[in-house]
Amino acid sequence: MAEPIRVVVTGAAGQIAYSLLYSIAKGDVFGKDQPIILMLLDIPPMLPVLEGVVMELQDCALPLLRDVIPTDKVDVGFKDVDAAILVGSMPRKEGMERKDLLKANVAIFKTQGAALDQHAKKTVRGIGRAAVQSLLQSSAKVAVVDLNATCGEQCKAQLDAEFGEGNCTFIPCDVSNGDALRDAFQATVDKFGRLDIVINNAGINNEKNWEKTIQVNLTSVIKGTYLGLEHMSKEYGKEGGTIINVSSMAAFLHSPHQPVYTATKHGVIGFTRAMADASSHGEYGVRINVLCPAFVDTPLLHSVEDEDNMGKFVKFKDDFKRSMTKFGVLQPSLIAEGMMRLIMDSSLNGAVMKITCSKGIHFHTYEPMSA
């Protein structure tokens, strides 16, 4: 049998979490052959309730459940977890505006995300995953689109356990395939009835197969933006929405180790700003902004050491590592916070958001063009 995985459930004393724990412990979420160590995290006043929950689970004598640990300390609850089910969020109250709900849950998610970043295993993290959780916590319905079907299905199972079935769907898709991407957009609308937010986040760092890097990092962003407009623009009789295209601080630099990657990120900014102007002049009702994070602690960051990815540019990997040491490495939760700000702030269109270790979330300003 496999080694046990550690799973943290926040808000574990609440009714929603309580209904999930038995399903997780008996293998409905992670498989019938996967042993589980459950970490139950809640605020200090709820610890006596958690003790009762522990006894109930232990009385069930579930063969996959190796241990249950209640705690009110985030460093204990998130320590080396393989999966996190974050139920500790604010539900939408009667008469509550969506923007207020988003604001409240961004604060909660920021705290939980910071704990994940600091204490969880790296496999739990990622910009896309952080953004999806933040959106689901704010009562959005989300389609996760990714090439890796195995990871995608596992991610969906965890999110279903956390937020309930029907709020998230997974669509396997190679975003560099235009027909497949179009089908993914249509499948999302078929599932949820409409589209309000598009986040074009797919990215690779492959200087050896540089044509593929252009297809994924730039061409798919252009296609994703156009498809988003087809489903959201008032020009097509829709109700408007928002699009976030993910670029990089690499767009503001020139580094020897990733010239094509850098070029694609320059392109994303130029395209996004031009399309934002087009949306404004055309009265599309769609805000289009771009997010530019510095180094982020994701698997993509470590691809620079792989010759199969970098080709002849792998010889510059030490320069890349020195840059990481100089500028620092961001955690995905901060990127998700930036995304939520772009979604929530209706005044932003054509904005270029930068996220760095030294300045946090801030915006790039351009000098007016002179004749």
Image (cartoon, rainbow, N blue to C red):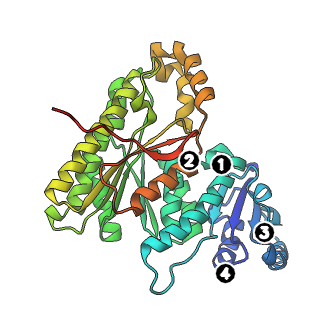
User: Which amino acid type is shown beneath numbered disc 3?
Assistant: Leu
The residue beneath circle 4 is 15
Q: CA distance from mark 3 to mark 4?
A: 21 Å
Which residue is depicted at the point 66% across and 74% down?
Answer: 17
Q: What residue do we see at 30% from left, 34% from top?
A: 267
Mark 4: amino acid: Gln
Does any portion of residue 230 appear in the rendered image?
yes
Is there CB contact under 8 Å for labels 1 and 2? yes
Q: Which mark is residue 62?
A: 3
- The residue identified by callout 2 is 332
Q: Which mark is nearer the camera, 2 or 4?
A: 2
Mark 1, residue position: 117
Q: Is residue 150 visible?
A: no
Decide if residue 197 is on the left or right side of residue 82: left
Q: Residue furthest bottom?
A: 94
The image's mark for residue 190 is none
- Observer-nearest of 108 and 151: 108
What amino acid type should be assigned to the residue bearing mark 1?
Asp
Circles 2, 4 touching at the beta carbon (< 8 Å): no
Mark 4 neighbour class, 10 Å CA radius: few under 14, some 14 to 19, many 20 or more: few
Q: Earlier in the sequence, mark 2 or mark 3?
A: 3
Q: Quadrant of residue 186?
A: bottom left
Query: Which mark is first along the chain, 4 or 3?
Result: 4
Give coordinates of residue 85: x percent, y percent.
63, 63
Q: Are marks 3 and 4 in contact (CB under 8 Å)?
A: no
- Front tag of 2 and 3: 2
86, above or below 98, in the image: above
**Could you tell me how far apart the alpha carbons at marks 2 and 3 are, in whole angstroms?**
35 Å
